[in-house]
Amino acid sequence: MSTQPLPAVPFLKIPEDADPYLEGHRCDSCGATYLGERDVCSKCGARDQMSKVKLPNSGKLYSFSIVYRSFPGIEVPYVSAIVDLDDGTAIKGNLIGVEPDPAKIEFDMPVEVVFDDALGRKDREGNAYMAYFFQPKAG
């Protein structure tokens, strides 16, 4: 059994000697940034102009949906959110640390990316997974 968690998604990087981070790809032609790996820019169509970048860990809530029905074993309700990171990259994830009540959630509220256990999920050998979440920014 591994002591270091496994990334729940391929664009979550967990270095041995540094903090976890999300990896995106930026178009060298137009500057558009995307979560995960790609060879072609969706904005300008440039091919083979994508470079790996470490994405920022803060942004603002762009949109959200409160989920009341999900797959068996997934605890509901939870808040599914789209966040615009500080560099303009839009990413989707779950918003934690706030009640799943529209009156308690504000559009454009500052949030930060946090890394934590992937809701108790483990692989066949018992290794834990790490996932990313958003939470309201303190202060």
Image: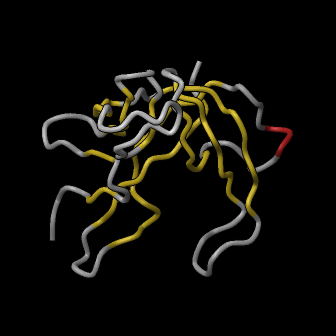
Q: Is residue 116 above or below residue 120?
A: above
Task: Return the x and y of residue 11 as percentages of the image width and height.
Answer: 34, 48
Q: Would you say 120 lies left or right of 4 here?
A: right
> Which x, y percent locates residue 68?
76, 66
Q: Is residue 40 left or right of residue 111?
A: left
Can you say whether 124 is above or below 30 in the image?
Answer: below
Near-viewer residue (76 or 56): 56
Q: Position of residue 22 (x, y in %)?
A: 36, 39
Question: Which residue is depicted at the point 56% across and 35% down?
Answer: 90
Q: Quadrant of residue 60?
A: top right
Height in image: 30 above or below 24?
Answer: above
Instruction: Tell me the quarter of the image containing the C terminus.
Output: top right
Pick the residue in front: 26 or 11: 26
Give the residue at x 60% y 46%: 96
Q: Is residue 100 above or below residue 50?
A: below
Name the residue at 19% across, 34% down: 18
Q: Quadrant of residue 20?
A: top left
Query: From the image, which quarter does the N terminus lie in?
Result: bottom left
Front residue (pair 16, 55): 55
